[in-house]
Amino acid sequence: MKTKLMTLLAVLLCWTAADAQTVFGTARPAEKKILVAYFSWGGNTQHLAEEIADMTGGTLFRIETVNPYPSDYNECTVVARNELDNGIRPELKGSVDNLDDYDVIFVGCPVWWHTAPMAIWSFLETSDYDFSDKIIIPFCTYASTYREETLVKIVELTPASLHLQGFGATGRNTNGVENWLRTINIIR
């Protein structure tokens, strides 16, 4: 089973990287309006999102839940695990103004329990937004593992979108961000 999952991940990553060459058509990436939407609990993902927004000129949008997660790590993991195990999509606070105006949407989060936090599921599955034909670029922060599974989950949650190669960083490390943005033709 693990071999099949890893093969699927490899195929998806190769497909998204190849698609990056043609996704912008005749428009220059600088002409595209960019949103950097992110969920952050400990500040690592926020740091990465701010770096991406600074380099791309994108608009930041923090995904927040109506009921904040506990500030204690152990308590937070219990809540996060319960949401995942029970398919609970937490209610979100705030919304993106005029999502239709954005062409490129970075979606970022930490890795929680081997996948994207349920707040990301809430954001991407809401009927308030139409991600069809949007360019979705996943990114995540992680301690040591499950980067690929988290990036793939964001892709799975936006099936009608175009997807570019995602990025993962450990902690607050932003090494490689500029090179990644150049590789996917977002900046020159």
Image (cartoon, rainbow, N blue to C red):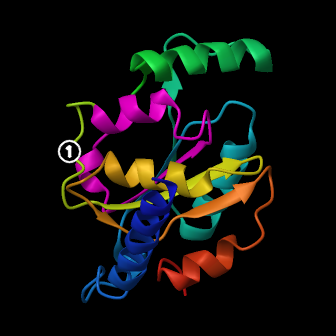
**Above or below, 33 relative to 143:** below
Asked whether residue 164 is in view, the answer is no
Residue name at image x 56 percent, y 83 percent: 182
Q: Which percent across, then down, holds residue 68? A: 60, 14
Q: Residues within 10 Å of mark 1 (few under 14, many from 20)?
A: some
Q: Which percent across, then down, holds residue 90? A: 43, 17
Q: Which percent across, then down, holds residue 35? A: 43, 54
Q: Which residue is mark 1?
A: 130
Residue name at image x 53 percent, y 32 percent: 117
Between 158 and 51, the one nearer to me in the picture: 158
Q: Amino acid at mark 1?
A: Asp
Residue name at image x 20 percent, y 56 percent: 160
**Above or below, 167 relative to 129:** below
Residue 161 is drawn in which quadrant? bottom left
As helix, strand or loop, the secondary structure at mark 1 comes to loop
Q: Which residues are magenta?
A: 96-125
Residue 44 is drawn in which quadrant? top right
Q: Is residue 1 magenta?
A: no
Asked whether residue 86 is in view, the answer is yes
Residue name at image x 74 percent, y 38 percent: 43
In the picture, measured across the screen, residue 97 lies left or right of residue 116, that is: left
Quadrant containing the C terminus is: bottom right
In the picture, measured across the screen, residue 10 lies left or right of residue 76, that is: left
